[in-house]
Image: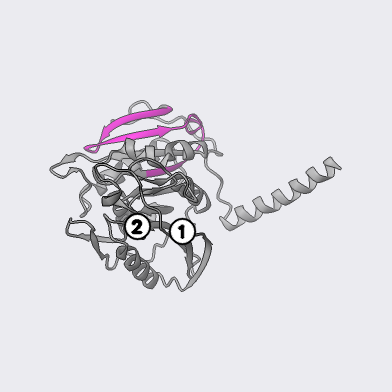
Amino acid sequence: MKIKLFLLTLYFVNIFVSTHLSSQEDIPLPATINIPQPIGDDCIKSPKEGLTTYKCEGLKFALHVPKVCLQRSCGLIVDVHGWMMTGELQDKNTDISKIAGQAGFIVINPTANKTVFGRSWDHKGKQDQQVFQFMKRVQSIFHIMKERIHFTGFSQGANMAWRFVCKYSKDLSSVAPLSFGAGDPIGYQSPVFIKPYKDCFGEDQIDILYAHGKTDALVDYSGALATLKTLGESWEMNNVETISEDAGYKRLRFTNQNNTIFEFISYEWETQNQGYLSSTRLKGHCFPGVDGYLGCGKDNSFHWGKEVVKFFLEHPKKL
């Protein structure tokens, strides 16, 4: 009886895997294809496993390399922090280096240089090329799978993620912005409103997961609604369905005739921490599933970093 049950289970697992791979155009999972030994360059001189910090392209980058990625072709995730943060603090809140590392991804955490506004990314994209060049450097050295290059970010980092969609969509597989819509900020007083990008979403469409708190006190939720409108019209995302929801959040999936997927999560959660950049200043400007002054709370229905990695695994580049 146990043998029959095992064989039946294996049968259905094979059906699921076959269907999943077919839907992803038979794209292999990360860390399943052998590669030549990585050879360094003028900045990443000795490629190695673990966490290493580099100063390249005029910026500081934390590079997380799982051991398997020295022998097999892995995916790549760029995870970018928000205003007044660092790459280290970003990773502490997303935990993506650990979660994605176990799934066969190398992870890059850039850190912005100090400015008169603290550590801050320029909203006009002055550092975009520097981050892009380091991404390409890592891609070349570690023989990264071209179908599995992804970008995510929080707040200002999310703003950069949207610009990467505008500028570098041919080089990306999918993206996941959190707490900032697709547009330029209008002023710097809280809450920040945005002016939606024009002529940004062209023919090179990629899958996107975007989340924004309804009570965001730092970057106004109206920017999320404007992003939905602009992206929906540009890519003709005319089909919509609710794929999950509860009292705290709602997740929508938009699709079009090209089978491009745009998932949007709106949530009610707020950070409860007090002090500088406390709940009264941030409210819904927070990481779902995380404690601390930037976290919405561990009791949330999902953990942002886990959802991002899951989305990236399920949404490689459409070839």
**What residue type is disc 1 on?**
Tyr
Q: Nearer the viewer, residue 223 or 131?
A: 223
Viewer-nearest residue: 314 or 210: 210
Q: Is mark 1 on a helix, strand or loop?
A: strand
Main SS of the magenta part reads strand
Q: Bounds of the magenta span?
A: 49-78
The residue where tag 2 is placed is 165
242 sits to left or right of 116: right
Counting from the top left corner in percent of width and height, residue 99 is at 48, 39
Q: Which residue appears at 30% of the width and 36% of the height? A: 61
Residue 19 at what x, y percent from top left?
Answer: 64, 56
Q: Name the residue under label 1.
A: 249
- The amino acid beneath tag 2 is Val
Which quadrant of the view contains residue 218? bottom left
Which mark is drawn over residue 41? none
264 to 313, vertically: above or below: below
Nearer to me, 31 or 228:
228
Expressed as whole percent of the image width and height from the top left, the position of residue 181 reads 32, 60
Q: Residue at x 44, y 70 (%)?
A: 237
Q: Which residue is drawn at 34% across and 41% down?
A: 90
Q: How many neighbours does mark 1 have within 10 angstroms: few (below 14), some (14-19), or many (20 or more)?
A: some
Callout 2: few (<14), some (14-19), or many (20+) C-alpha neighbours within 10 Å?
many
Quarter of the image where the N terminus is located: top right
- Could you tell me how far apart the alpha carbons at marks 2 and 1 are, in whole angstroms? 25 Å
The quadrant where residue 183 appears? bottom left
In this rendering, would 58 be left or right of 232? left
* Residue 77 forms part of the magenta stretch: yes
Q: Can residue 89 be seen in this view?
A: yes
> Which callout, 2 or 1, points at the residue further toward the start of the chain?
2
| Residue 74 visible at all | no
Q: Which of marks 2 and 1 is in front?
A: 1
